[in-house]
Image (cartoon, helix red, strand yellow):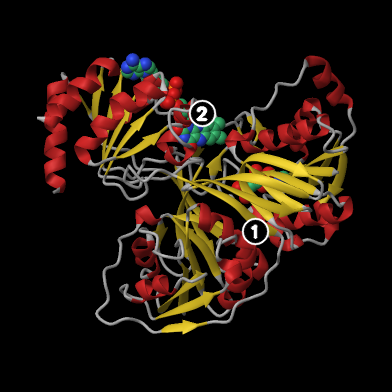
Amino acid sequence: MKVLVSIKRVVDYQLQVRPTADGLAVDTAGLKMSMNPFDEIAVEEAVRMREAGIADEAVVVACGSAACQDVLRTALAMGIDRAVLIVAETPLQPLAVARLLKVLALREAPDLILMGKQAIDDDAAQTPQMLAAMLGWPQATFASKIEVTGMQANVAREVDAGIEIVQVSLPAVISADLRLNTPRFASLPNVMKARRAVIEQIPAEGTGVDLAPRLETLSVAEIPTRPQGVRLASVKVLAERLQQAWRALQ
Amino acid sequence: MSTLVIVEHDNQRLHPHTRALLGAASRLAGEVDVLVIGHSCSTVAEEAATLEGVTRVRWVDAVHYSDLLAENLAMVVAQMAAAYRHVLLPATAFGKNLAPRVAAMLDVAQVSDIVGIQDAEHFVRPIYAGSLLETVRSREPVGVMTVRCSAFMPVGQSANAAPIVPFSAGPDMGVVRLLQRVRIDATHPQLANARVVVAGGRGLGSAEAFHRLLDPLAACFGAAIAATRAAVDSNYVGNDCQVGQTGKIVAPDIYIAVGISGAAQHIAGIRGAKLVVAINKDPEAPLIRLADLALVGDLHEVVPQLTEMLQR
Ligand SMILES: Cc1cc2nc3c(=O)[nH]c(=O)nc-3n(C[C@H](O)[C@H](O)[C@H](O)COP(=O)(O)OP(=O)(O)OC[C@H]3O[C@@H](n4cnc5c(N)ncnc54)[C@H](O)[C@@H]3O)c2cc1C
Ligand SMILES: Nc1ncnc2c1ncn2[C@@H]1O[C@H](COP(=O)(O)O)[C@@H](O)[C@H]1O
């Protein structure tokens, strides 16, 4: 079986971002960039499938600027076999990414596409479902457990009411939730080896895909801050304040 | 101009957030149609017909919709949606799974998690775990959107029921099958629409302490139980209790956070809460700084005392 994993390069999840001075965009200048946390989990899952002999090849892809090579090398160091960068210097929205990934999926013909459930910058949670629709494949989103047997996968999905287990026929798109696994740290020798690996580059323009953003960001603002709260001196005061608030609700 | 609202249900009842979803739809001009798609779900269609602002209910009933899986639903929704200006779904696991699939079939962009509607083209949505608000313009012929229901006013009952119009079923793709649904225990009120929420974090230390301390406190208010990802990962409670960027978004009147540090990814889920109370032994914990009412202290002492005072 062949697995394709998609990864996005985003502002590191530990950092706080601010709007630009003109309030028109997000100021990401000079911030540390990392692999989207959900994509790290997707990569880990692909590597485990490879190690368990469920997959015989794992390919990773990122769509974006040349700078994405760093996260692709991280994926290689974690144990992915081969990396592809679809180069686009302009920002891409989920619909365009899904189209680019479709082009690659048709070329690579994977049995399974593993993705993150959402990118922590746009918080869209759209690209996997869009790609599945474009390919006419089933989708198992928000996965917390994946079991592949033959040309089928049983996937536990994290849904609002708890867990839902679905069986999808392959090929399929699966998007990873946080509890699927805990990603490994790549060893130093593997990091060194990944530095020298060749990353295939495909210019996005050459694919014929319409890359133009469909949604226009008009403004970005910080959320309104809450008024300064109070520190209470004792449990008794807290009990009184809570009783007050509770009575006001009745 | 008209709007199609895809409602969430379990083939028996509408999801409680449906009134707020219709509240969002009422912010857009024109008629509002509701699509009820499922199996043996006529009572759901009847319930939807009684809600304020609904012009008609379109009802699709077939056995291959009984599990409400996106692959088959999307075929019907995409076919129907092309005739509407906007298509709204709730920003829940159900809606988030379905909406992008529909949008891709219509070849349009989708807007996720809207919390504000300015007009037919302008929407407000949180990004970066809710630390920023973005105003976007969508000029797509069909605006497919998921709605954060807690941000909108629920509609009431309508004086006369809207007509229910059956619509023919689409094909069964046969590529996915539901094997099992593990349901949450129904002893606590539903988190999504609870007025009071008692939430616990890693500070509770064990599943035993979590329940021994928080269940009686929650009982004082008939409150729902919530948790951080750290608490869920430590198996204090089930994943259905997780609040935050990747869990549920809640907007209760009172949110009582016990032993929770207040990571950005957790705060993302409680920004709509009216009164935030934090109990933490660390005076520097971000949630202590953010809370409206903060009590610095050891939760093992504070919570039993508090519960006892409230019970009186
Ligand atoms: C991509 C991503 C998504 C995430 N999504 C979510 C999400 O949806 N929801 C979520 O919650 N987290 C999420 N997280 C995790 C998040 O970053 C934090 O790790 C998590 O919220 C911390 O949980 P906590 O506050 O319970 O634990 P901790 O941060 O360990 O805090 C425990 C707190 O308990 C206090 N404490 C300890 N003992 C006592 C005592 N005896 N009395 C009083 N106080 C005490 C401590 O002072 C501390 O402040 C996500 C992380 C990532 C990377
Ligand atoms: N530019 C990109 N390159 C590669 N994969 C992406 C890109 N954008 C999104 N994805 C994938 O789609 C998932 C969901 O992203 P989103 O729909 O933007 O929330 C991510 O976790 C990635 O796996």
In the rendering, at what x and y percent does residue B222 appear? 24, 42
Could you tell me which chain the residue with mark 1 belongs to? A
Identity of the residue drawn at 26% across and 68% down? B156
Point out the frontmost of discs 2 and 1: 2
Q: Mark 2 = which residue?
A: B233
Which element is circle 2 on?
helix
Quadrant of ligand 1: it is: top left
**Near-viewer residue (B248 or B62):** B62
> Quick check: B54 above or below B193?
below
- A140 left or right of B134? right
Q: Is residue A86 above or below residue A129?
A: above
> Foreground residue, A121 or B202?
B202
- Can residue B259 be seen by looking at this rendering? no
* Percent position of residue A205, x then y: 81, 56
User: Amino acid under label 1?
Assistant: Pro
Question: Which quarter of the figure is the C terminus of chain B placed in?
Answer: top left
Q: Which mark is residue A31?
A: none
Residue projecting furthest to the left = B312
What secondary structure is found at the residue carrying circle 1? Answer: loop
Which numbered marker is on residue A213? 1
Badge 2 density bin: few <14, some 14–19, many ≥20, Cα 10 Å? some
Tell me: A179 left or right of A205.
left
The CA distance from mark 2 to mark 1 is: 37 Å
- Residue at 43% in and 75% down: B42
